[in-house]
Image (cartoon, grey):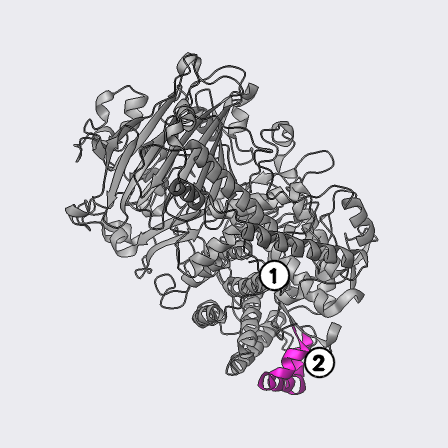
Amino acid sequence: MVKIDAQHEYLGEEEKRLKEDREKTKYWKKWGPYVAERQWATVREDYSGDGDAWSHFPHEHARSRTFRWGEDGIAGVSDTHGLQNIAFAFWNGEDDFLKERLFGLSNPQGNHGESIKEAHFHVDNVPTHSYMKLLYKYPQAKFPYEDLVAENGRRGKDDREYQILDTGVFDDDKYWDIVIETAKEADDPEELLFRVTAWNRGPNPAPLHIIPHVWFRNTWAWGHESADKKPSISKVDDNVAQSKHYKLGDRYFQLSPSPGVGPSGQDVQPELLFTDNDTNYEALYGGKNVQPYVKDAFHRHIVDKEKKAVNPKNTGTKTAAWFAFDEGGGVAPGECAVVRFKFSKHYETYLDEEEFDEIIDKRKDEADEFYYRISPLPMAEDLRNIQRQAFAGMMWTKQFYHFIWDQWANGDPNQPPPPPERKAIRNTQWKHMHLDDILSMPDSWEYPFFAAWDSAFHCIPLAMIDPDFAKKQLDLFTREWYMHPNGQLPAYEWNFGDVNPPVHAWATFRTFKIERKLYGREDLDFLEKVFHKLLLNFTWWVNRKDFDGKNVFEGGFLGLDNIGLFNRSEPLPTGGVLEQADSTGWMAFYCLCMLNISLELAKHRRIYEDIASKFFEHFILISDAMTYKSGATDEKSLWNEEDGFYYDAISWGGPWTQQLPIRSLVGLIPLYATLTLEPELLNKLPSFKKRVQWFIENRSDVAERNMASISKRGNHDRILLSLVSKDRLEKILKRMLDEDEFFSDHGIRSLSKYHEKNPVAMDVNGQEFKVSYISGDSDSGLFGGNSNWRGPIWLCVNFLLVESLQRFYMFYGPNLKVECPTGSGDFMHLGHVSEEIQHRLQHLMARGDDGRRAINDGDDRLDFDPHWKDNLWFYEFFDGDSGRGLGATHQCGWTGLMARMIHDTGQLTSLNSISCRLPQTPRTPSTGMDHYFDDVFTRNVGRPKGEGRPKIRRSSTTRSIGARSDFDDDDEDVQSRVNSVGPDTAEREKERKEADEATANYVSEQLSRVRSHQSVDHVNEDEFEAQLDGQ
């Protein structure tokens, strides 16, 4: 539960389910949205000899060719091992094939790399997936596949991408709003209800075919399972199919007739179709099919009218229910088509649609209650909606990820062996990998594979709503089937051996602290377990990435793709090695995160004091190496005193070093390495305190010359460990907060705008390498060309900058003020600077006074159309000038950090003073609050039944059954209904009322503190550093 006070521990229904799942009394997470949105063209499915995954398994093959390692679909649900899958297909009567998966361009097809070309939104989802909602906007005209490929192919890297909204296919509102909802029964996590409501937004009647699919992932064709384990699905009644699987048992796909849309008033009866999930070799390669009924049978049967394509015996490993809403021209304008079905362990003769809808509505109300309790303080509804969709996106991008290196590299017994040269293309050193897990993906379509540093950022918002899942993600990456035996963490499937920034320790400690603060649970076993494995990873960094053993680190691209002059993952064309300010800054940051964890563990086991001392000393040495001020005449620094900034440098050994004067995130990342030591904690850890004191007295030359003082105490008698002194901090911030350099209206840019007119270039053997400020998409193909770190805004690095400023504030307090923005004459302490950055970041997505969102780039449809304006895309990065959304559109992973920032500054927490400022809103807390509280704030929980919801039509069958006297409820039926829908007993209502009163008192208390200015000068201190318990 979200902790409000010590006396009230009311668990909402979703919190109860999470507790049951955590305690393993019920497996609520067994079924979830674990089906990928793209499985084709992934590295796992690539069996080519040249490693060209995009060409080896293109989109055109996906409907006819069996996947080896996973499945994909629209709004797909599966079990945690991806064995059985439920997803949706649609047909508008115009397309050449069913819309059963989302379409996008491959990397070679896009002028800025791979890119989805659809309009879908992750609207809602809770951690146990007891309620899920996705919106898909499907054109009524023929989907513009060819146009999207051709026009993007025509455009160059200096042009904008050609998106589906640019094609005109949504003009005149000629499209379907298809709302897909999934719910679980109150007492059984394996009883799944699905409801599809498709609204005709166009001006004319239009036909629509809704075809839900149920199928098994093909595990039988590869030679690893005996034939008797092959699953099956067969028809057992007109509207019921039974599936059998040796691991999952028997289940029933039970369908309800749908209310008719034509003049006859007749219900729409589903037609069950069957085939096998096997490749159509004949269509793809001119070969012979292993099975007579193959994967693409439903396309051929429905679209091509090939009636013999499906199995007349009504059995197979894949089934679909075909609902055709085409009578009388189809669904009338403004009306909807509705499909309901259940996936159950129990065979039922019919579905009670009234009870069915009641269960879904009840789960929706419980989702409202759950998310309200995460952020109970007053907040604008727009911000609450953004936060809710951020969380929803995090849940929808959970995916089943399967990869066994030995089988992937060597091939399968029943398949032709892969080309022998394939083994040498990628990931040859990762033979230990055996992955079969639910992972948090960076993006549901563009990045349907894990990325190590992305996953670490995901865990911050995840920890707010499901700390157990967040901890599981962090733990998995350090397990022996993920982490390399040498201690390296896998980066991503295109190259597991690439190097991502070392943020795992930071995410581990933050997750631990968030769970303790929000839920009152202190999982020291998790912290200690992951810490031990991270010791191996830290050692790998020290041994592999410190070329000369002098604590100045290389590291490669470190997630920042094209930020430098050269490809940082390859040898330099200049010779020498690249000494990276960001890599060294990251390692100092890593040191301090490990120090924080050590101190936290030392509170319970004193042996960790020695390890804390080790990381304290290592940090001092890295800090020393960043600046080279030992007095030797041949020393060069990564710090440039004249520019007041850190730069990368090329080192050829000895005194031969050349700085690369590019003002980028590389020079800001050293700010991350900041930590305050709490005096009360030091007094409780005598061994560590003695070691710190020894350094102060005996190594003051090292400790004082290039870092913040450890002998002088700061605010509340704290000690500051930091790579940057006060003087350097002020110099860096002068550039970072300059709106002509880094400080955009929407956050901190990745490259200084100074380089727009002052590019940095170097000629190497007749080849020019050049970096200039580019606010939007990349103008190069470096790292695939689908991301850009030469100007745009990225939330992940901004988030760490915000936290660093808050740590500096904890030490310097309100007395250190800097000009923000530079040149404005407006001075702020660093706590307020961190808030200012967060407000600017939030206004990427929040509506301005003109009703527009910056991410929408002035698109009237997205800003003002009632059917579009409240649905958001969570872009990968943002234009450094305009805030326009760029890159992947469902990058809920680190862009989901928006949910945390809204929690911290978009509402009135007890430690933050200002709610998210609207444009031109005064900054002072009292006037800011007065401005904001003029709005009416209400909790949208437990709304009266039927209020605010469109009435969804039901079939005539249900209406007639419900009216018959011989179907009166008996006691057993009533109890069954209560078990399915969920109890609303007097005792439960009393508990809820008491919890609501406690929450109301909490909110009132926080508002009083704000109005009395008690919380003006605080940040979330207890979430950053190790402190004494109770502090």
Q: Which residue is mark 1?
A: 8
Residue at disc 1, secondary structure: loop
Which disc number belongs to residue 711?
A: 2
Give the image quarter of residue 689. bottom right
Is disc 2 surrounded by few (<14), some (14 to 19) or many (20+) residues within 10 Å?
Answer: some
Q: Is residue 442 visible?
A: yes
In this rendered view, identify the residue nearer to me: 505 or 979.
979
- State the quadrant of the C terminus: bottom right
Residue at disc 2, secondary structure: loop
Q: In the rendered structure, which disc, 2 or 1, sits on the residue that comes first in sequence?
A: 1
Point out residue 78 in the picture as x, y percentages from the top left corner.
Answer: 36, 44
Q: Is residue 25 above or below residue 319?
A: below
Is disc 1 surrounded by few (<14), some (14 to 19) or many (20+) residues within 10 Å?
Answer: some
Residues rendered magenta in the picture: 677-706
Relative side of 62 to 956, left or right? left
Q: The disc labelled 1 sits on which kind of residue?
A: His
In this rendered view, identify the residue nearer to me: 193 or 41.
193
Q: The disc labelled 2 sits on which kind of residue?
A: Ser
Q: Is residue 431 above or below residue 326?
A: below
Which disc number belongs to residue 79?
A: none
Residue drawn 20% across the image and 26% down it: 312
